[in-house]
Image: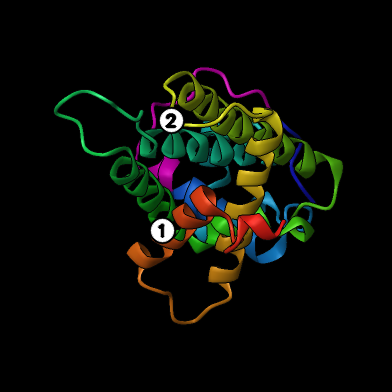
Amino acid sequence: MESPSVEATDPPARGPRHASILLAATAIIAERGYHKASISDIIARAGIARGTFYLYFSNKRSVFEEILEQAIERLAEAIRPIELGPDSLPPRTQLHANLTRVLSLLLSERALCSLLLDNSLSPDPEGQQPLASFFTRVRAMIRSSLDTGIEMGLLRPCRTEWVAAACLGAVRGVVGQLLETPDLPELGQLVDEIIDFALHGVIARPDAF
């Protein structure tokens, strides 16, 4: 039975214990799902006392929200604005580097990816709401990038809210398949294929349509 939630006042600064709690919580939720994961499971995996957990987090939802917040921060750090200055690399090269960083981040943390992509892990409203908020923010990041690309003349005008949702769905599909693949493909080739799909689609003869 879970201990009652307590208000965490003036939590300690982030450090090794904070990180160990997040790693343990990510692993437990990825293995058992949000509903079945317990604070007892998390503290046992992290090797800490219950009181130490409550120094940093008030309840299970707060640690789940922190996992998602850090994921957003790291994704934002991986995506860098496209530059068009005279000394800048070609836009495709910059886009390739962005996608490589994003996919490298996601594929290096399979527990986090499972937590994000497997809807069965968060079947109850308490777990679904933070996850839905996470993907709303990711779509907003993608939409902002699309809007900027249109302003720069790199992208055609489009309904960016819909295209952002399509882009997110494509990435989720690719990463979900890769998580089930024992032998990962060469990342550079994978990113090239994604970019070619974005730029050219799959139609070989546009005149046929």
Q: Position of residue 21 (x, y in %)?
A: 50, 47
Give 200 or 195, whichever is nearer the viewer. Answer: 200
Q: Residue at x 53, y 70 (%)?
A: 178
Q: Position of residue 30 (x, y in %)?
A: 63, 60
Mark 1 burial class by Cα count in 10 Å: few <14, some 14-19, many 20+: some
Q: Is residue 73 above or below residue 187?
A: above
Give 180 or 63, whichever is nearer the viewer. Answer: 180
Taking 66 as reference, is 88 left or right? left
Q: Residue at x 49, y 24 (%)?
A: 11
Taking 147 as reference, is 102 left or right? left
Q: Describe the element under mark 2 as helix, strand or loop.
A: loop
The tag earlier along the polypeptide, 1 or 2, is: 2
Q: Which residues are magenta?
A: 6-19
Q: Say if residue 98 shows up in the picture.
A: yes
- The span from disc 1 to disc 2 (Cα, nearest Å) is 19 Å
Taking 94 as reference, is 12 left or right? right
Q: Residue at x 44, y 81 (%)?
A: 183
**What is the number of the mark on residue 191?**
1
* Residue holding disc 2: 154
Give 77 or 142, whichever is nearer the viewer. Answer: 142
Q: Say if residue 27 shows up in the picture.
A: no
